[in-house]
Amino acid sequence: MNGWDAVPGEPRPGVGRPPVRPPSGLFPAGPPPRPTWREPYPVSGAGVAVGGVTAVAWLLLFGLLGHDVPSYAWWTVLAGALAWLTAAVLVRFGDRGVATGIAIVTAGGWSIAAAVVAVRWAQSGDWPLW
């Protein structure tokens, strides 16, 4: 009878209760099957901002030590390398948000130094770093 071999007295699939389907996962019915991992030091906007402001001050102080384009560029490269080393230590042992702000601003500072070197090179036709 329509492929349903029921014991006498047992309701047919469409009668009484709906058939059981496995959940799709779109709407979870209970707790996750395994524990959820949480970041021990979550990145916050305030941490990124603090790292960015600190890196700007750091690069500005080192950039002011230069008296011409080559010395400005080399001081910026040195300051950026020290800043990225600090960011790497912070990623491993400290605040990842501050490390992110330092890395972003340092990359921007290196880009500005590279643009200054490129403009001087284009104007003079001589490589300004040595």
Image (spheres, rainbow, N blue to C red):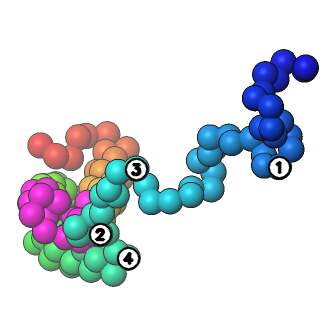
Relative height, residue 22 to residue 106 (above, below): above
Q: Disc 1 or disc 3, which is closer to the eye?
A: 1
In the image as oriented, which residue stretches furthest toward the right? 1
Task: Name the residue beneath numbered marker 1.
Answer: 16
Q: CA distance from mark 2 to mark 1?
A: 51 Å
- The residue under the point 28% across, 77% down is 47
Per the rendering, the mark at residue 33 is 3
Which residue does the numbered mark 4 point to in the structure image?
45
Label 1 sits on what residue type? Gly
Residue topped by disc 2: 42
Can you tell which quarter of the image residue 65 is in?
A: bottom left
Does residue 60 appear in this view?
A: no
- The answer to which of 56 and 85 lies nearer the viewer is 85
Residue 35: percent from the left, percent from the top? Answer: 32, 56
Amino acid type, residue under disc 2 in the picture? Pro
Q: Main secondary structure of the magenta part?
A: helix
Range shown magenta:
85-103
Mark 4 or 1: in front is 1
Element type at mark 2: loop
